[in-house]
């Protein structure tokens, strides 16, 4: 089971809301809404996505990474490397 | 007409793809996919949203802002202020 | 004169403070300070740099870009393109 | 000893270079260099700072966090919480 299992319903709810935001953005564009208002909504959706990512990451560290650290060996190193790469992608996106 | 009118269909296409990505994310969570793979997809969706924002912003500057600059006066100042705030929200999100 | 001339002293003051922060970071590393405390200071310096960038950008739009828009022609288009590229670099860094 | 001890000299070298970049930025402002060129250098310094942060974070996870995970108990939970907060600050800066 992935580390986020306990909060699965919460993540799904937040992602459904973000899906709704991306549909709202299409409606704004179709109705020629003012550029700055569209940008404000894009920033909101981006922040919401990042917030889901940060929750998943914390749950991943508390679950999979802690387990791998206890198991030790190459598995622990690999988990750290993989998480570091995922964090770099988040920071740079 | 907003500055993005000429590229409306392109923006709509990209936003529909992002909507699909957010649905794909829900499916990944429902199927207990590995946390790091979910994070990779979130980074991709975030980058795609930012990319739409950067296009809209450029079109806004080339359209509304250039027009306001030519009209001059308080309107020009207001457009600059408003764009600066939108950029700050993007940079900080 | 660049668009930021009026606020030159303010920018210099903020950059001197950021220079001080980068020296403080070296001292923390030399003294083996706790990683998380070093990271907190890096986030502060990054935010301070971004804040200088956002001010410069607003002054650039209010100065050079508005002027170029009034002059019109290819110069105006080029200024928009150039600013859009600078914004993209900020958003992605 | 913090997790970054093995790479201390490398971090110091990178931070000295970033300190040099912040001094170079002051010189650019003093000499009224073009706004967009100043912004390009700010983006470079920001990316360099983020890159130091990502290295420190990886070393922190491989060191302190793995150790705490093995020790177990409340200490492990606290380390995860603390790292998650540091990551959130990086992502949002």
Image (spheres, coloured by chain):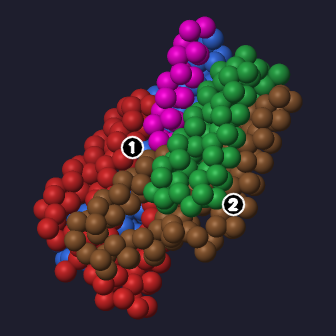
Chain colours: A blue, B red, C brown, D green
Q: Residue furthest top?
A: A73
Q: Residue at x 20, y 60 (%)?
A: B11
Q: Decide: few, some or many residues near mark 1? Use Cα within 10 Å; few <14, some 14-19, many ≥20.
A: many
The quarter of the picture where residue C62 lies is bottom left
Decide if residue C43 is in sight here. no
Which chain does the numbered disc 2 sit on? C
Q: Is residue B54 above or below residue C37?
A: below
Mark 2, mark 1: which one is toward the viewer?
A: 2
Circle 1: element type: helix
- Say which mark, if any, is on residue B72: none
The residue range painted magenta reads A73-92
Position of residue D21 in the picture relative to residue D47 (left or right): right
Q: Nearer the viewer, residue C74 or A50?
A: C74
Circle 2: element type: helix
The quarter of the picture where residue C48 lies is bottom right
Relative image position of residue C40 (x, y in whole percent): 72, 45
Residue pointed to by mark 1:
B42
Relative image position of residue A29 (x, y in whole percent): 22, 70
């Amino acid at each position: 089971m992935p580390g986020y299992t306990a909060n699965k319903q919460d993540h799904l709810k937040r992602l459904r809301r973000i899906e709704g935001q991306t549909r709202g953005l299409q409606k704004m564009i179709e109705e020629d809404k003012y550029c700055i208002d569209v940008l404000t909504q894009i920033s909101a959706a981006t922040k919401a996505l990042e917030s889901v990512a940060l929750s998943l990451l914390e749950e991943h560290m508390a679950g999979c990474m802690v387990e791998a650290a206890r198991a030790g060996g190459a598995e622990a190193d690999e988990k750290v490397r993989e998480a570091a790469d995922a964090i770099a992608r988040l920071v740079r996106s």
